[in-house]
Image (tube, helix red, strand yellow):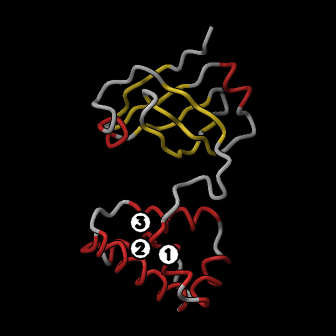
Amino acid sequence: MPSKIEIIKENNALQLILPDDLVEKFKDTKRVLCVINDIHEFHVALKHSKDGYAWVWLSKANLKSVGGEITSVSIEEDTSPLQFYESPVLNEVLASDPHAQECYNSLTDGKKRNLIYAVYKIKSPDKKIEKALLFAENLKRGYTDFRDLNKKIDYLN
């Protein structure tokens, strides 16, 4: 019998509570790949409590992508290199600038994910490129607080 994941609504998001067998299976895992209704896949952090349970957050955007209704959820360990989406635009910008690529490679995986997400979430292809270029320039200057930088250039979002 498949494991049942409990869904709890909290503020503007949903919390997906893992059953005990999945908590045990993922006890040493920090990031997972979550698939909702067999159609929407996303990378997410797996949170562990001191009380022995584990959960993932499901945002409004992820819920909206499946029409607001959850019929099935599957969770597996995320084995992708950064445990996050790829950003072809950012990869292209970094490939064209070896110094920016070197600076990017020195970042922690968490900072890389922040940077990728800041570019990934933009809908306009032109603005994605512009933001990736701005981030590359700031990387070369040694500026790596992308959340702060993202607020300063939020006109690109």
Task: Confirm or deny contact between disc 1 and disc 3 (CB under 8 A).
Answer: no
Within 10 Å of disc 3 (Cα), the crowding (few <14, some 14-19, many 20+) is many
Give amino acid for label 2. Answer: Asp
Residue at 40% in and 19% down: 71
Q: Vertical placement of 19 versus 13: above or below?
A: above
Residue at 55% in and 15% down: 4
Q: For numbered disc 2, what is the local secondary structure? A: helix
Q: For numbered disc 1, what is the local secondary structure? A: loop
First reached walking from the N terminus: tag 2 or tag 3 = 3
In this picture, residue 49 sits left or right of residue 25 = left
Residue 83 locus on image (x, y percent): 61, 52
Task: Confirm or deny contact between disc 2 and disc 1 (CB under 8 A).
Answer: yes
**Quarter of the picture holding the C terminus:** bottom left
First reached walking from the N terminus: tag 1 or tag 3 = 3
Q: Vertical placement of 5 versus 43: above or below?
A: above
Q: Vertical placement of 131 versus 62: above or below?
A: below
Within 10 Å of disc 1 (Cα), the crowding (few <14, some 14-19, many 20+) is few
Q: For numbered disc 3, what is the local secondary structure? A: helix
Q: Which residue is mark 1?
A: 145
Give amino acid for label 1. Answer: Asp
Residue 118: image tag: 3
Q: Nearer the viewer, mark 1 or mark 3?
A: 3
Residue at 68% in and 47% down: 79
Q: Which residue is mark 2?
A: 148
Residue 12 locus on image (x, y percent): 31, 38
Q: Give the alpha-carbon distance from disc 2 to disc 3, as whole Å.
A: 11 Å
**Quarter of the picture holding the N terminus:** top right
Foreground residue, 84 or 141?
A: 84
